[in-house]
Image (tube, rainbow, N blue to C red):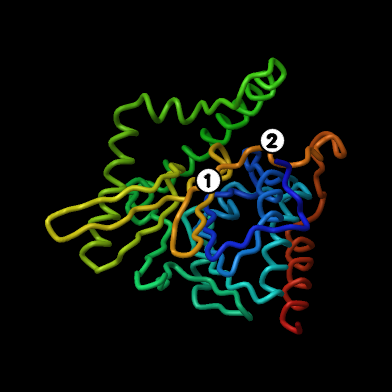
Amino acid sequence: MIANKTIKREVDIVVISDVHLGTFGCQATELLNYLQSISPKTVVLNGDIIDIWQFKKRYWPKEHMRVIKHFIEWIGNDVTVYYVTGNHDEMLRKFVGFKMNSFQIVNKVVLTIGEKKAWFFHGDVFDVTMQHSKWLAKLGAIGYDILIMINSLVNRISRFFGKGRISLSKKIKDSVKSAVKFINNFEETAADIAVENGFDYVVCGHIHQPTIKTYSNSHGSVDYLNSGDWVENLTALECVNSEWRIYKYDEDDFVDESNQDQGIDVIEKSNKELFNELLADFNLTRHI
């Protein structure tokens, strides 16, 4: 069924993470299609929305700006939006506590869903590489971005021959024992800490692995959720009537508008010009 942008799905909470706006791997067009198809009450942007690590002023496609403007439009319409900081947008941690209308920047957030408590944070706090060898993590991010570019070419060829989407990085993660062990340790650590603190849900991003599963230990149990990413998995978490699900983007559900704008449409603007344009939109929401 083709999505009708005038008829939006009602969602109580949507969690989006690891968009990496400003990088070649970001699937901004697909994300924008998704954003335009829903009407959320609360939005949790769970880290790495803008990739400040790899941001280049000469690569900022219109679709990336449209995603930002869509978030601002939600804020202007009194949708509650939490921007949870991640490692790739850690610069924003200087502004934790900032609030404007229904928008605020936080390091973590706790929400009550029905009679249960949900704990949201990005998850890079568990990454030893981030804590002790940030230069190595940044180098890995560059390598990952190159892999995603190669993956994009592979997927174009795959679609040409009528095949489905292929994720090279997922194949690598699934086949390398150390990567599998890291993911399992990440999930177990988040779950154990959540149980100790009496949470019913713990919701993370960071590792680009969308999942919903229950973890139990001698002290109790917790539902661990991860929203995945918008680079390779194209996933989000949705909560409706206290029930969680993983949303997985399917291009067949949307009208293909890609032929209207061939190639990469790049806005040649300085960082200052981009900032001033966003500031103007924020000022508009302030007076609504």
Q: Is 218 in front, or is 230?
A: 218
For the N terminus, give its image quadrant.
top right
Q: In this view, does 242 lie to the left or right of 191?
A: right
Q: In this view, does 7 lie to the left or right of 100?
A: right
Residue 30 falls in which quadrant of the image?
Answer: top right
Task: Tell which residue pokes out farthest to the top in this image.
Answer: 161
**Residue under the image location 73 percent in, 77 percent down:** 285
Q: Is 171 in front, or is 118?
A: 118
Location of mark 1 (residue): 229
Q: What residue type is labelled 2?
A: Asp
Q: What residue type is labelled 1?
A: Asp
Location of mark 2 (residue): 252
Task: Tell which residue pokes out farthest to the right in this image.
Answer: 260
Who comes first in sequence, dot 1 or dot 2?
1
19 versus 42 height, above or below: above
Q: Is 31 in front, or is 239?
A: 239
Q: Is mark 2 on a helix, strand or loop?
A: helix
